[in-house]
Image: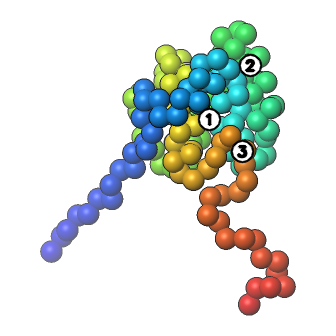
Amino acid sequence: MNISHKPPTPKWSASFCGCEDPTTCLVTCCLPCITFGQIAEVMDEGRSSCCGQGCAYGLLMVCACHWLYSCIYREKLRAKFNLPAEPCCDCCVHFCCYSCALCQEHQELKLRGFDPCKGWSGPPNAPPHMPPSMMR
């Protein structure tokens, strides 16, 4: 008996053009560098700062190259959560509508237990780190 069971393909929890969080949408429309910085800090697991990443994004906006930088982080997010490239490839999404892409990524992180507004504080629901002397 040959039963082929294919695991379900992961999907985005947050919609691309839906504005689930009006505050994030407003901040992203007015100052996308803040939203990007928050996403980048969480995706880099605290190895980069929101301020540093936001400033880099803001400088790239001056020469209209910000979408190249942010598509890298969308790709990281998709790889981390095994998400499909929807509605199209990462760079096209950020080139065509970077504000919608940033809102979706921010909301996706929130729905997966992270709070980009607070920065990186470790994986969600992770057990506390035990010193070696306390392990059995």
Residue bearing the label numbered 1: 73
Q: Are marks 3 and 2 in contact (CB under 8 Å)?
A: no
Give the amino acid at mark 3: Lys
* Distance Cα–Cα, label 1 vs label 2: 15 Å
Where is residue 60 shown, x and y percent of the image? 72, 17
Residue bearing the label numbered 3: 118
Q: Looking at the picture, does residue 25 appear above or below residue 46?
A: above
Where is residue 14 shown, x and y percent of the image? 45, 39
* Distance Cα–Cα, label 3 vs label 2: 20 Å
Q: Return the residue found at the far front.
A: 22
Q: Looking at the picture, does residue 66 appear above or below residue 116?
A: above
Which residue corresponds to the image point at 15% horizontal and 74% vertical from the top-left? 1
Which residue corresponds to the image point at 71% horizontal and 57% vertical from the top-left? 122
Residue bearing the label numbered 2: 58
Which residue corresponds to the image point at 73% horizontal and 53% vertical from the top-left? 121
Circle 1 sits in a helix, a strand or a loop, which is it?
Answer: helix
Taking 3 as reference, is 112 left or right? right
Circle 3 sits in a helix, a strand or a loop, which is it?
Answer: helix
Where is residue 97 shown, x and y percent of the image? 50, 19
Q: Looking at the picture, does residue 81 appear above or below residue 60?
A: below
* Distance Cα–Cα, label 3 vs label 1: 18 Å
